[in-house]
Amino acid sequence: MSRVHPALPYLWMLLGAASFSVMAILTGLLRDRLDWQWIAMARAGLAMLLAAAWAWAAGRQLVFFRPARLWMRSIAGSISLVCGFYAMTHYPISEVLTLTNMFPLWVAILSLPLLGQWPHLDVWPAAALGLAGVALIQQPQFGGGHAAVAAALLSSVSSAVALIGLHQVRELDPRAVVAHFSAVALASTTAALVLFPRQGRLLLDGATVAMLLGVGLSATIGQLFLTKAFAAGPPARVSVVGLSQVAFTMLLEVVLHGRTFHGTTLAGISLVLLPTAWTLLRGGAAPTGDLPLSVPSAGEQGPTA
């Protein structure tokens, strides 16, 4: 087996983060063309088809009813995906991605009730700083902002639960896990179409279809690079590089939309990302060292959410 250059996992993670940023930007562009439920359904459906086809081509068996603990991961990931797409279509993308990327802090905190492991003491001030950043990120001038911020936070918490659930099904083939999650996510997004209010947006012209395909394709490419990065590099440090997704998205918003960022917003983003990076580097989310922070989930970045 050939050795991988030490810099390659970080390059792959950068490329993966850039791909996920494209997915998020396309989602933002679609919000005036489609209700958010349709975008989330397209994302989940494309992922399900790709993952199932990938598993079938590799001769891997898909799973559904068992093991029961797989459902913890898939249900939590589906909640994360639904909340993430709602937030991305109701609030500025960069701020949403900042909030959803808080999941390592929640993994650290939830490691006690879900895994029986005490987090490092420095996790608590890191979480406090992160919540202070959340308060600064909230911008009343955006209609429905509080609901979107709450959804983004719930997405990050659900991502943490999904990641812990993923740790508990490590014996399963990753493609089968992704296919299971995607099927549950498709059912969840379909339910959201019925249960949550819609504005009746359904503009299915060529540009809309192209952007929907772009959402699925960019997420798949990002997943490929992310999987390669975590297979070859140190999970904690590679995860920190993954936070560059926020920077890529901010740059795209500036270039494509001419957006400017207020000092308060930048301070809030920093207060969320810096403690998150510290937690990752310190291994605070994995006190015993056996829970790799390998996959961002949520709205949706990685293979797990």
Image: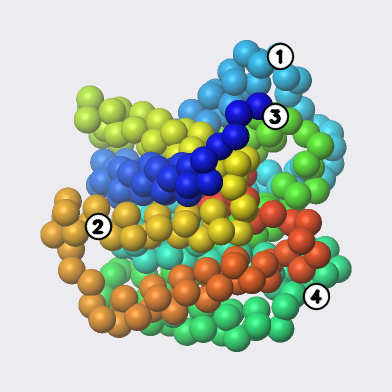
- The label on residue 118 is 4
Q: Secondary structure at mark 3?
A: helix
The x, y position of residue 118, in whole percent, is 80, 75
Q: Quadrant of residue 144?
A: bottom left
Label 4 to label 3, Cα distance in Å?
A: 31 Å
Q: Disc 4 or 2, which lies upstream in sequence?
A: 4
- The label on residue 59 is 1
**Residue placed under numbered mark 3 in the picture:** 176
- The label on residue 251 is 2
Are discs 3 and 2 less than 8 Å apart at CB? no
For marks 3 and 2, give the one nearer the viewer.
2
Measuring 68% from the left and 44% from the top, which residue is drawn there?
A: 74
Depicted 120 relative to depicted 239: above or below: below
Q: Disc 3 or 2, which lies upstream in sequence?
A: 3
Q: Quadrant of the N terminus?
A: top right
Depicted 128 relative to depicted 88: above or below: below
Q: Disc 2 or 1, which lies upstream in sequence?
A: 1
Label 4 to label 2, Cα distance in Å?
A: 38 Å
Q: Disc 4 or 3, which lies upstream in sequence?
A: 4
Q: Disc 1 or 4, which lies upstream in sequence?
A: 1
Measuring 62% from the left and 13% from the top, which residue is drawn there?
A: 57
Residue type highlighted by circle 4 = Trp
Q: Quadrant of residue 231?
A: top right
The x, y position of residue 165, in whole percent, is 74, 51
For marks 1 and 3, give the one nearer the viewer.
1
Depicted 61 relative to depicted 260: above or below: above
Label 1 to label 4, Cα distance in Å?
A: 40 Å
In the displayed structure image, the side of residue 86 where residue 256 appears, left or right: left
